[in-house]
Image (tube, coloured by chain):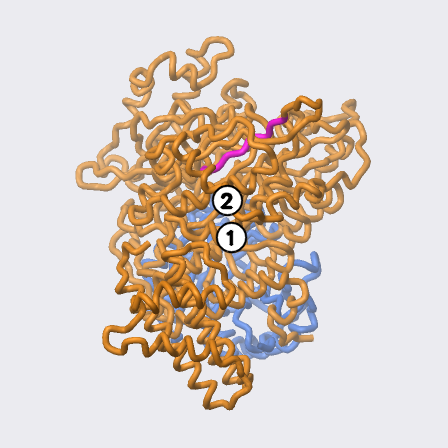
Chain colours: A blue, B orange
Amino acid sequence: MGILDIQQFGVKLPLVGGSLTKEKLREVIPVFHQWIREQGRDVELLDVADYSHVQDGPGVLLVGHEANFSVDGTEGEWGVLVQGKRDLPSDLDRRLHSILMNGFRAVEDLEQALGEVEGDFRFSRKQLSFRVVNRLVTNGAPSALAPLVDYLNRVLKGIFPGITFQMTQKLGDPRSVLTWVVVASSELDFRAFCPEVEGDKRVPLH
Amino acid sequence: MTSKKSWKMRLNEKIPEDWGEDIDVFERQMVLRKEGKLSEKVFAETRLRKGVYGQRFDNGKRHDGIRTQNFNFPNQDLMKGPNTYWDAPGMIRLKIPYGAMTVEQLEVLADLSEEYSDGITHITTRQDIQFHFLHIDDAPDLMRRLAAVGITTKEACGNVVRNTTACPFAGVCRGEAFDVTPYAHGLSFFLMGHPDTQDFGRKVKIAFSGCTTNPCGLTSFHDIGAIAKTRRNDDGTMERGFELYVGGGLGSVPSKAKLFDEFLPEGELLPISQAICRVFGQLGEKNNRTRARMKFLVNSLGIEEFKRLVLVEREKLKEDKEWTSFLGHLDSTQIGATREGTELDRRFLNPVVQEWIDTNVRAQRQANYSTVNIACPLGDLSASQMRGLADLARDYVGDNIRASVEQNLILRWVSDGDLPDIHARLVALKLADAVAGTIVDITSCPGTDTCKLGHSASRGLASVLREQLAVVNTQLDEAVKELRIKVSGCFNSCGQHHVADIGFYGVGRKVKGYMVPHFQVVVGGEWKNNAGSFGLAIGAVPSKNIPKTVEVMTSHFVEDRKPGESFKALIGRLGKSEVKQWLKELQKVPAHAEDPSFYSDWGDPREYTTGDLGVGECAGEVVSFTEFGLSDSEREVFDAQLLLESGEISKASSAALEAMLTAARALVRIEYPDVGDAPVEVMGEFRSRYHETRKFHDPYAGAKFVNFLFRQFEDEDFSEDFETAQHRIEEAQLFIEAAYSCYARLGAGAQ
């Protein structure tokens, strides 16, 4: 398996304005249950796991077959994380589109569902983290990811014409998940990329 | 640079050969299951014995609060057990004997939790580690990465000897007779994979304790419980041994272990344990899994008869060097201090650190050293916390890390002078709560979060109670602080509710047409004295009223107790009927329209239902050693095919014969369980027991298939051409089919 074949990459869209209390975080739980009920994404959604009692942990997790969704607080940074797992499209372009679209749509849907607590659930439109959780392929070497990060840059430029993206490797504990921080030159319009946000249309992957 | 190597290739040299072979075999069994060449039932028990467990909703169904959904997994026709989808997320349990872990292991666990699980490393109530939401296809690589750092999943589940637990303070405790660690280690690895532990109707759990009084070992509710003892012999020498108990267990009907021997000399620990396993394997219930634990056998035979049978069996055992070889190097499990022990300078301690030391730190018997008990909420740790703990351990204690049955981590050999620095590091990791071993430090099984048997959300409740009690912790009466709360999601007692001061287990109740999550309230249990007594349920309370129930019970304890009276003693003095009155108002359920929150569980907004209950895998699949042997022979003949494909013709022919011998031995073991694996012995026994008696002969083909075995066995020349080798493999396949038919003809009662 090469770097361009992997499925275990994800995007995390950071929370604007700091941290979430346990109580606020738990408001996500019924929203995720509703998503399972609707099965309206291109991921088979299976279960919800509440890790709000774990500091700097996965927060509230929506377990899917192809990818997990979470309001995640790992390493003290809160955000919406969509993490690819398996059985995503074999074509890298489609795979990246799927993860990005699910991330953008999750942000839109969570903000909409939790609108009553506006201010607590606002996620960035200018920045995202791109993370790869496959140590067999990365072998702890950031340079291993370069072709994938380049590819991501091209995909993002294709989705958002006219916007440039600055990609920087996140430094920190070398044992942690390899992560790139992506900063856009201006705010991204997620809705333009995932028009089915307001609908309930599932795009099958299989 | 991208690595295209597999984990198997990358870690090959770090994995013990036999462990690596075990994992390879499991991987091939997965292939056979995918190809339909291994039955769901046999594969289920096979994976359980590798620690690969099922999880809630793995039957492909989930109640979403309104209706039952069917999941659309990619492999709709592939199952990993009866009614268990291949693609459904599962759990994997590791085997961590006596909870001991190294720095390197913590780091690997952190990596694995991120890559294959949900980012959480979970400590169980038996000093084990579990990962949840895993895909079975990831299991072999995960096992290899564990094996490379000395962790196995072998026999972590299934009807085998499970993880051996022991007091986490062994070796440093002030009250112990001696360090039980090397004995727990020796017994654990002696029985792992032992032929006498492969044919149980249910699991066997073993625990060690260094003393009688403290609850760290919990020997009273284990199948085999060993408490360290010494005695002075006539010649003045001090002899080590164990007060040995058998037949204890929790589950729905707890049973206190019976005294087997007041003093079992240390050299007899392994052979007597082996003999106990043999008696349990031979006489234990196999068909009715609800009565198949050792406690039922001990109770039905009576302890004296059970003991007599064990001693008879002990006499029959062939001498085994392993019984005593570990006694020659009892210090091999000792990991000493990595830093010089210095005194704690208490002059400038701030109150927060002092409170933490008072609660979480315990002086070792070695001067200027202590243990630090790190309270892990619900036993869960994130990957960054695990790495932080690894760094902390590396800097201060090295590999002196143990998990506890209270789902915490314990650092040993901490120099007292380092305590303030360690506290500061734990604060940074958000693991410095001064609650270890108090009423706030609640243990819980997974319950409805992930367990197929869970009735109610034990973790949801434990989380809420922890938060509620943490707020008032500093104002709590000292006696209340010392109480233990334990929560199970069902009556099976994985949360050990029977031995808590206040225990809860999940049940469902129908109220005016709606299901309402409840917990039975269990009182009268005793945590001390190695879990000295078991509590009884006094009434079910709606889940949402349990926090109030704890308030009421602790208030009564403060108000009604006599000086020095324990909670158990108070319950005994007042009587359960009076205590039940405390719950009367709390047992009422408001109408659905009045308060719908009562109709969903903690942390789960779905309307409550018990419709998600599945068939548990705790009991495993009862698969006889014959079925396992026949299954192994199928795998071996499959391996022969692979060898043939890769051009290794001679090896392929040899493997075909091996496969037939494995099948023949499986049948011989029905009548002669102790048959060895030497080919000549297997052939001799098979000939006299199955050929000469014609038991193996096919009703239509007669001795045709048995002759395949005899002919190949006599022909030792394997340097043949491709076609002959293929012919041998075909014959082996037919022989194995005939062995299955023979087994079926013998009937289920044959064993």
Q: Is residue B34 left or right of residue B420?
A: left
Within-10-Å neighbours for mark 1: few <14, some 14–19, many 20+: few
- Quadrant where the C terminus of chain B is found in the figure: bottom left
Q: Amino acid at mark 1?
A: His
The disc label shown at residue A54, or none: none
Element under label 2? Answer: helix
Q: Is residue B5 left or right of residue B740?
A: right
Q: How many marks?
A: 2
Closer-to-camera residue (A1/A68): A1
Which range is magenta? B223-230
Judging from the image, mark 2 belongs to the subunit labelled B
Q: Which residue carries the number 1 mark?
A: B194
Circle 2 sits on which residue?
B274
- Looking at the rendered structure, the kind of residue marked 2 is Gln
Are tags 2 and 1 found on a single chain?
yes
Q: Are marks 2 and 1 in contact (CB under 8 Å)?
A: yes
Q: Position of residue B576 (x, y in %)?
A: 32, 18
Q: Is residue B339 left or right of residue B354?
A: right
